[in-house]
Amino acid sequence: MQATNPRKKTSGRKAVTKRAALAGAERAAPGEAAHIRAYGVLKEAVLAGQFRPGEVVTLRSLAKELSIGEMPVREALRRLTSEGAFESLPNRSARVPVLTRRQVEQILELREDLEGRAAALAARNITLVQIEHLRALQQGMEQSVAKGDTRTHLSLNMAFHFEIYRIADNAMLIPLIQMLWLRMAPLVANMVPFMTTKGGVFRKVAAENHDRLLAAFQARDPLAAQEAMSKDLMGLTKVPGYWESLDLTAG
């Protein structure tokens, strides 16, 4: 898989975002405000890695892609900008932030704390049915990486993690975790070539840490779950080439 230029809008994103918009429209509750739908679709697109660091978007282009008016899109962008997913620019446009290494390290430190706490809570609440669901997601991840389908792996990985945070049953934690994921998601998408070239190491790190999480949940061990989540979040940073694979700015 070849790396794409992160500064350019990817041609495939329009189709993906449009499909997400149509799916969002189908799921929308009757009478749901357009700006709420636009916010949900754009947020899902950011989390799914459909944007790249430094990418510039305009109200007009997004409104056309989403088949939603510019006013709802403006409100959605305003909310996502306040959450750190975009930066405001002149001329009715916005840009995906480009982070420094120190900023990424700070985000990971916060994620380690919050997501480790959520894993510990989940270990107390989790049921056998939920463990089996997580196990099925993990099996899907392993199969997707074996096939070289890294983007499917990223999608399943997000589902795996947010299922854990949902099981944690702490309504205050999830928005904080989502905000940090929004900041990291464009960088994670840039790691696809790295994860492909380092496939064996990536599979080993990802599978071992998720297996540790599942074992901790099976044992109902909050401390072990917290430690496993920490290893999962920080493990790839120790792999040679990790930091070079991110699109970081100097600082």
Image: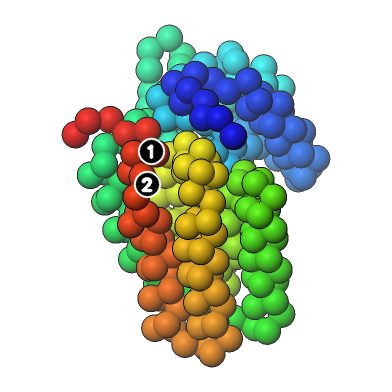
Residue 227 to residue 24: above or below? below
Residue 245 location, x and y as percent? Answer: 39, 39
Image mark for residue 246? 1
Q: In the image shown, does 19 or 52 lie closer to the viewer?
A: 52
- Decide if residue 130 is in sight here: no
Q: In the image shown, does 20 or 30 lie closer to the viewer?
A: 20
Residue 62 location, x and y as percent? Answer: 60, 21
Q: Around disc 2, counting alpha carbons within 10 Å, would you say few (fewer than 14), some (14 to 19), or many (20 or more)?
A: some
> In percent of the image, x 71 and y 80: which residue is there?
129
Q: Around disc 1, counting alpha carbons within 10 Å, would you say few (fewer than 14), some (14 to 19), or many (20 or more)?
A: many
Q: Quadrant of the C terminus?
A: top left
Q: Amino acid at mark 2?
A: Tyr
> In percent of the image, x 48 and y 30: which residue is there?
52
> In percent of the image, x 33 and y 66: which residue is there?
113
Q: Amino acid at mark 1?
A: Leu
Give the residue number, with chain letter if any, for mark 2. Answer: 242
Residue 214 to residue 96: above or below? below
Disc 2 is placed on an element classified as: helix
Whole-angstrom CA distance, mark 1 to mark 2, is: 7 Å
Disc 1 is placed on an element classified as: loop
Residue 110 location, x and y as percent? Answer: 31, 58
Q: In the image shown, does 205 or 165 lie closer to the viewer?
A: 205
Residue 141 to residue 246: above or below? below
